[in-house]
Amino acid sequence: MSTQVLTDAGVDALTELFPAWRVWADEYGWHARRRGLYLQSYHFGAPTFCVHAASAAGLAAQLHWQQAADAHTPFGCSRG
């Protein structure tokens, strides 16, 4: 089976599991970026808008962590 076929299957599976994220893979690894009108901000405490990993499993783990963070702090963290 071709490596590209397996990569495409991984992208499809992650896209189905995480519909709020646009997932892709390239020669640099696996990537996900939030879909929709999402403010991309780098200030302290801002929610993550993109993640990267070396493997599909690594990206899935990061996206699961991000789902948990979003559930507890949907608008990011503040210095309260």
Image (spheres, rainbow, N blue to C red):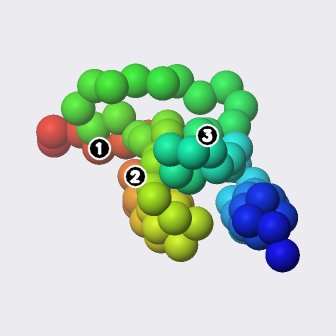
Question: Which residue is drawn at the image coordinates 84% and 75% (left, top)?
Answer: 1
Q: Does residue 12 lie above or below 75 as drawn?
A: below
Residue 43 position (above or below residue 10): above
Q: Which residue is mark 1?
A: 77
Q: Separation of disc 3 and disc 1 at Cα?
A: 18 Å
**Secondary structure under badge 2?**
loop
Can residue 4 be seen by looking at this rendering?
yes
Of all residues, the one furthest to the left in this rendering is: 79
Query: Eyeballing the image, is 17 above or below 24?
Result: below
Quarter of the image where one finds residue 5: bottom right
Identified by mark 3, the residue type is Arg
Image side of residue 48 versus residue 15, left or right: left
Q: Pointer 1 and pointer 2: residues touching (CB < 8 Å)? A: yes
Q: Are marks 2 and 3 in contact (CB under 8 Å)?
A: no
Q: Amino acid at mark 1?
A: Cys
In the image, taking residue 4 as reference, residue 25 lies left or right, namely left
Residue 57: x and y in percent read 53, 72
Q: Which mark is residue 34?
A: 3
Query: x, y percentage for residue 61?
Result: 47, 70
Q: What amino acid type is highlighted by mark number 2?
A: Thr
- The crowd level at tag 3 (other Cα within 10 Å; few <14, some 14-19, many 20+) is some
The foreground one among 33 and 67 is: 33
Which residue of the protein is positioned furthest toward the front in this rendering?
2
Across and down, in percent, residue 78 comes to 24, 39
Residue depicted at x 52% and y 51%? 29
Label 2 vs 3, first from the N-terminus: 3
Mark 3 or 1, nearer chain start = 3
